[in-house]
Image: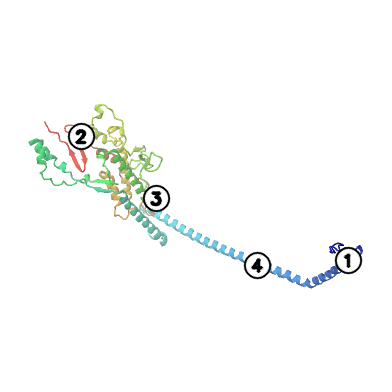
Amino acid sequence: MQCPTCNLHQRKFYCTSCICNHVRDFRISTHKAEAERDAEVAKAKVALGPMEKRRIARAEAASLEERIVQVREQVGKTKSACDAARARIRSLRQTLVNRRANLDVLSQSSSTSSSQSLVSPSPFTRDPPPIQVSAALVQTHADLAQTRRVLIRELLNVFDIQQRAPRPSLVSSTIPFLASSVRRFGLGASMLLAAPAPAPPPAPVHPNQIQWTIAGLVFPVPGDIHRFPTDHVQAVVQHTLHFMSLLSFYLGVKLPFEVFWDGNGSVGVGKAWIRAGRGPEQGGWARWSEAQPLHPVELPSSNSPSSSRPSSPSRRSSSGSNTQPSPSRNSASSPFAAMATGLAMLNYNVAYLLYTQGLDIPLSATGETLRNLYALCSSPRENTGRLSHATPNPLSPLPPPTPSSFTLEFGHLLQIQNASAPSAPSSSRRSRRGLEEDWDIVEVEEEV
């Protein structure tokens, strides 16, 4: 339609009849196209009928092949698992056979050792043990003994246990000369004559005067313990206890007397005590189940002159001869009186430890603790470390403490140590001796 003003065509208008004709023609063409489409679809279905069957067959074949591959992989995994199980079963069977052979060897060895004291067994009475197993046992035991010997020798270097002879004292060597000068010419002349006096030759050192040290500290013998301060004695005893615990652990030996600490249960925390463990009546040590101190104990002392005066030698000798002393029977003024029984128990442990390694010491030498330990650790014997409670030798097992062959009586050892207690100083002459820069200072009173 054209605008009458601007003559611009905007829209086209159709009449009703035109629209009806157009819709009818569209429907006719649509129906015709649908018929042609249906005919083509039917032709395609007819043409694709055989192809669909082939596709389905190919898909089924592919799925079957995939399943076959999966089954083959699973079969391979199952075979490998079966092979591993068979190998493990074979190894377990071999291990079981070896263990049974070892048990047979141990049973035969134990029966041999038990019957060895009665009848000498003939080599043809039973089958010999497997050579490989017996050789392995012997080699393992030899290696273990060698390792123990190396460990106990290293303990000497760690704790620095060594012997030291006392140094000769120059002042003490001139004491007789000074005393004679004082008596003859007076004190002034003795001071003038003391300087040019020739020093006498050093006296030979007695074996009992040799001092043994641990960690640089002198270990006092039972008769000399009162000359040392309490801190020194406590430090030396604790070092020795630590050394003994490591030594018995390395050797695998159970000691008759057990050491414990009153702290939180840890070794070295608190104060040390010692008491007898479980054992037979052999040796007379098992009945000492009451704990004895291994540290200086300050006992209460009276302020009266009679109690502060030292006891007589006869009284001390009678108390030292008792095989079961108590701390109250000794001198109350000494903090070391209560340690006598504990130190005797410690020395009994040392003697038994030496016995287990084939070293016997006389009863008179049981008080030399560090000397005996040094002799054990530095012993050139090849059987050191072979006998043990922890890993017994099947040919010669170590019996529990203490066997009948260990003849040391604890009462005799305690009596010997109590008899070596120091005697009281004489009241006729008083002397004061101190150690200052390796000099012995002695004051001599002039007799009137």
Q: What residue is shown with label 1? A: 22
Q: What residue is shown with label 2? A: 425
Earlier residue among tags 2 and 1 = 1
Colour scheme in use? rainbow
Q: Is residue 97 above or below residue 246?
A: below
Split into 4 quadrants, where in the image is the C terminus?
Answer: top left
**Image position of 170 (left or right of 62):** left
Q: Which label was assigned to residue 390?
A: 3
SS label for mark 4:
helix
Q: Nearer the viewer, residue 406 or 357?
A: 357
- The answer to whether any part of residue 359 appears in the image is no
Residue type for callout 4:
Ile
Earlier residue among tags 3 and 4 = 4
Q: Which label was assigned to residue 68?
A: 4
Contact between labelled residues 1 and 3, with CB atoms less than 8 Å apart: no
Q: Is residue 140 above or below residue 172?
A: below
SS label for mark 1:
helix
Give percent across and percent down for residue 363: 27, 44
